[in-house]
Amino acid sequence: MMPIQLRFCRIWMLFLLTSTLPVDAADQAIRWTRVVDRADWQPRDSQGEVVYKDRLWILGGWFDSFEPAPRDVWSSVDGKSWTLATQAAPWQHSDLPMSIVYKDRMWMMGGWADGRLPTHSASNQVWSSCDGVAWEQVTQAASWSPRIAAALVEFKGKMFLLGGTENYYFGDAKSLKNDIWSSSDGKQWTLVTSSAPWSPRAYHQAAVLDNKIYVFGGGNYVPEYHALNDVWCSEDGANWAQVTSAAPWSPRLWFSSAVYRDHLWVLGGWSNNPNKNWGDVWYSKDGKNWIELKADESWKERHEHSAFVFQDKLWIAGGHAQPLSNEVWSLQLPKDWPNDEPARLQASTETIGHWPLREDSRDHSANQLATTAKNLSFETDLDTGMESAVFNGRSSVVEVSANAGLQLGTDDFSISLWAHTDQVLDDVIGDLVSCYDPQTRTGFHLGIYNHGGVTNSQPNSRQLHFGIDQARLEDGFTDHGQLGNAVYVFSLCVHAGQLYASTCHAGETETGRVFRFEGGDRWKDLGSPDQSNAISAMAVHNGQLYVASAKYRLAGSSLSESENTNMGGRVFRLTSGDVWESCGQVSPETEGVASLVEYRGRLYASSLYRPAGFFRYEGGQQWSACAVPDGKRPEALTVFNGSIYATCYDEGSVFRFDGDNWQAVGKIPEATQTYGFGVYRGELYVSEWPKAHVFRYTGGTQWEDAGRLGQELETMPLLVYNGKMYGGTLPLAEVYRYDEGKQWSRIAQVDTMPDVKYRRAWAMAVYQGRLFVGTLPSGRVLSIEAGKNATYDHQLTYGWHHLAAVRGAEKLKLYVDGNLVADSSSFTPNDFNLTNSKPLQIGFGAQDYFRGKITDVRLYRGALSFNQIKQLASESLSGKND
């Protein structure tokens, strides 16, 4: 046996040797450092920024669209302590200006002033300074037209200005520019080209690397939003070559860029498709091959922040992080970065299973996983030649037996498949792939979800949802504020990447309004389409948002009646420029519309109060009256298994409409009113008053009790979210989760208004991976996240699409046709162990059996890269059998 002293000596020597070995850069943790939480300057975005005389500089920016742009100038030697150079620089157009250091001076040019105020304007003034205090106006009017959000670089001894827009909020497509100008003194400018080959754009970036100018990203904000992720380069500023038409980072506006460690960098930004801030960071040596930098700690997603390279660090400052920020962060990479970074970040993948679903349901991978199919048929698409399995939406499913290979644990994994949906629907679309245990709330699901009959609204339509869970729930709801003076959030609806809310107001001169969520507690008021006190219902039809009005009787919620006596019963749609267009009145007798729903390509509406009414939209301002069930009022409307189902306030019944006739499908025991619907695991559920029970439809006229929500009196909205069904109640405005059988678990109370009889958790929607809830009488909207979720908050168009879902080390990602369209908030991998004993199911999951066609389903262990997904999406599947 080795003497203890000798063993200790050898261990100590080994420690000395190993502790002095250099740590490979690929193994070093990459972390952003928060330099300061709150810098001395006021939170802002859209500011000018430069590094000058060994200092970081912040120049002006944006606080609000209805006040002048700030004119202050700040500098810092360390990013933590900031010095005010001047509170009132002589320039005024400091919102989205162009700034640069050139010939040992700071330069500030162009920009926007006065937001949306009547005095707004763009500038082509050019200013310079050597100390940030005294500014010289080099020219009052440069040769290029007044503009904002252009790109500005130093290249071959000159300043080059590229593109931009002449009008921020009030322009059109003609306002966008793709001209290029150069100057050696800031006063005399030469037109390099009036029309570069890259499309006119603003909110883009340009950078100089290896004696080339690169232009990338950007697009337009209003009136017609579009975003780009193309990259172009030029060796002279006049002749351009496209490096790539689609970089792997999502198309975006309002991002920042830098050249750091001989690489181009893209940091954060904003997009409207999906509607979100971005917090990702990408780098490239050539503008074509991009790698996402993964950091163990980073800043919150944001747009229009400053980016600097200073003291061999990459810095960001300020920006709109919902809310505005005055944080400062820095990143210093290891000295030998990037070392073998590309190889490290290229995740390895192995195929778990491959189900072509063209002639059979077998797993064609080497693993040959045991697979069975039920009620599946196969066909070849005559238009595309695509061979696929047809899922009937009622009972079709492919089931892969539980086995060790399907135990994903905390590993990365990826799903790739092709799916086809019909243009005209009379059913929810349903789930694509799932492996989930509803008892333990563990596993994952990928589906295309429609939610209808959520009291008054059809809040989600054709929206792609990828979720994982291991019984995780945020500690509480996030309060997104009251919507103006609203007492009632009647409806929530997700449309074109945005969340909309409709409201009821109590004042004599107040009218129902529609609001659009802008993050945090900010809502944009889109006005009152009608003169009544409520906008009661919302739905998406033919790709447009429709809303309906009502004269809501607040006494029905034990509140004082509104003194606004104007009748509702009208329908409107939102058009470009946030203008409401009238679609007519459903009938002169209708006081208010209860619900809107799309069915077989047509829009239907129901009446809130007597006389009973049920109407179909015929276009223009025309509505036709349809039959009503036994003279009763159909209220909440949902579409399921070929029919419209309706709740009823006249009795505790449910009715079904097949396009021509109504049929009674049962009375709910002890109920006097029915309220809302949910489709959960292939079955229809309904809520009721006065016992707050939920019932499951079992066919014919039979309904089975699925339990009571606490000791509440009324259950209203039902909605499926990340594997579970949730419900809202009265009188305490509580939210519950359905935990199978007759068990409901209380999540939280979402309205705590004192001294009222009734509080309602009334409206629900899924947006940006979260469950949103609207309330009465506080008129507020709140949200919570269960597990982790990525949602594509746009209608997935009909026809064939390639869909991919990736669980990566920190985020979930969703891809449509090879493009990244959504990701989740960050998470710790060990928090989500997805191992369960359930089978993998194709065509069934948390909401319903899939209605459509599926082919080429692949499940991988490991995270597919952007390029791998792009390749899968570009492959033609016609005639392939392997």
Image (spheres, rainbow, N blue to C red):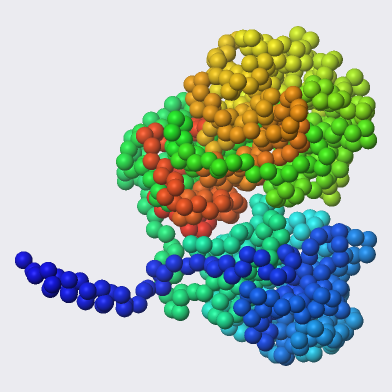
**For this view, does 21 lie left or right of residue 160?**
left
Q: Position of residue 320 (x, y in %)?
A: 70, 60
| Residue 686 visible to an observer of this rendering | no
Location of the N terminus (image quadrant)? bottom left
Picture residue at 80% right of the left edge, 57% below the top: 222
Q: Is residue 691 left or right of residue 1?
A: right
Image point 57% across, 81% down: which residue?
A: 311
What percent of the width, then of the height, locates residue 202?
75, 67
Would you place residue 654 above or below residue 99 in this image?
above
Q: Quadrant of residue 426?
A: top right
Q: Nearer the viewer, residue 393 or 496?
A: 496
Residue nearer the viewer, 483 or 11? 11
Q: Please report the residue visible at 45 percent of the width from the left and 40 percent of the height from the top.
A: 470
Q: Quadrant of residue 308?
A: bottom right
For the residue pair 322 and 685, the one nearer the viewer reads as 322
Q: Is residue 98 above or below residue 852?
A: below
Q: Residue 520's spot in the image, x, y percent?
A: 70, 50
Whether residue 633 is visible, yes or no, is: yes
Q: Is residue 481 left or right of residue 358?
A: right
